[in-house]
Image (spheres, rainbow, N blue to C red):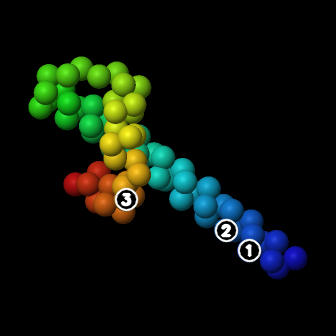
């Protein structure tokens, strides 16, 4: 029974980590969208920004760095 509790705890930890990563990526995508408007005068929808950001940055996304960036 103890192993089952550890398993549930790990699953919960993974789910929380995944949720945190997705929320941070959404915030980074929004920051990218704003940056494109401010620096390039490109008005992107949130979906368009995500379509551009994901292939450019998602593979190398580091949620620890993103968290520091967002908290500034």
| Mark closest to the chain's N terminus, 1 or 3 | 1
The tally of labels here is 3
Question: In percent of the image, x 39 and y 33: which residue is there?
Answer: 50
Give the Cα distance between marks 1 and 3: 26 Å
Q: Is residue 35 above or below residue 13?
A: above
The residue lying at 39 percent from left, 40 percent from top is 54
In the image, is residue 71 above or below residue 10?
above
Question: Does residue 11 lie above or below 52 as drawn?
Answer: below
Residue 61, image x and y in percent?
37, 54
Disc 3 target residue = 62
Identify which residue is drawn at 48% across, 46% down: 22
Q: Nearer the viewer, residue 14 or 40?
A: 40
Q: Which mark is residue 40?
A: none
Q: Quadrant of residue 8?
A: bottom right
Is there any visible trace of residue 46 in the rendered image? no
Residue 65 image point, x, y percent: 31, 60
Q: CA distance from mark 3 to mark 2?
A: 21 Å
Judging from the image, what secondary structure is the residue with disc 2 in? helix
Residue lying farthest to the bottom in this orientation: 2
Callout 1 secondary element: helix
Q: Earlier in the sequence, mark 3 or mark 2?
A: 2
Residue 14 in percent (x, y) is at 61, 61
> Looking at the rendered structure, which numbered label has been put on residue 6?
1
- Dot 3 and dot 2 residues touching (CB under 8 Å): no
How crowded pointer 1 is (Cα within 10 Å; few <14, some 14-19, many 20+) is rated as few
Crowding around mark 2 (Cα neighbors within 10 Å: few <14, some 14 to 19, many 20+) is: few
Element type at marker 3?
A: loop
According to the picture, the residue beneath numbered tag 2 turns out to be 10
Q: Quadrant of the C terminus?
A: bottom left
* The N terminus sits in image quarter: bottom right
Q: Residue furthest right?
A: 1
**Mark 1 and mark 2 residues within 8 Å of each other at the beta carbon:** yes
């Amino acid at each position: 029974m103890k192993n089952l509790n550890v398993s549930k705890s790990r699953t919960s930890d993974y789910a929380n980590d995944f949720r945190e990563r997705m929320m941070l990526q959404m915030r980074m995508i929004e920051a990218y969208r704003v940056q494109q408007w401010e620096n390039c005068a490109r008005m992107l929808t949130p979906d368009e920004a995500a379509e551009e950001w994901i292939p450019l940055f998602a593979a190398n996304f580091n949620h620890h760095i993103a968290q520091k960036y967002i908290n500034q």
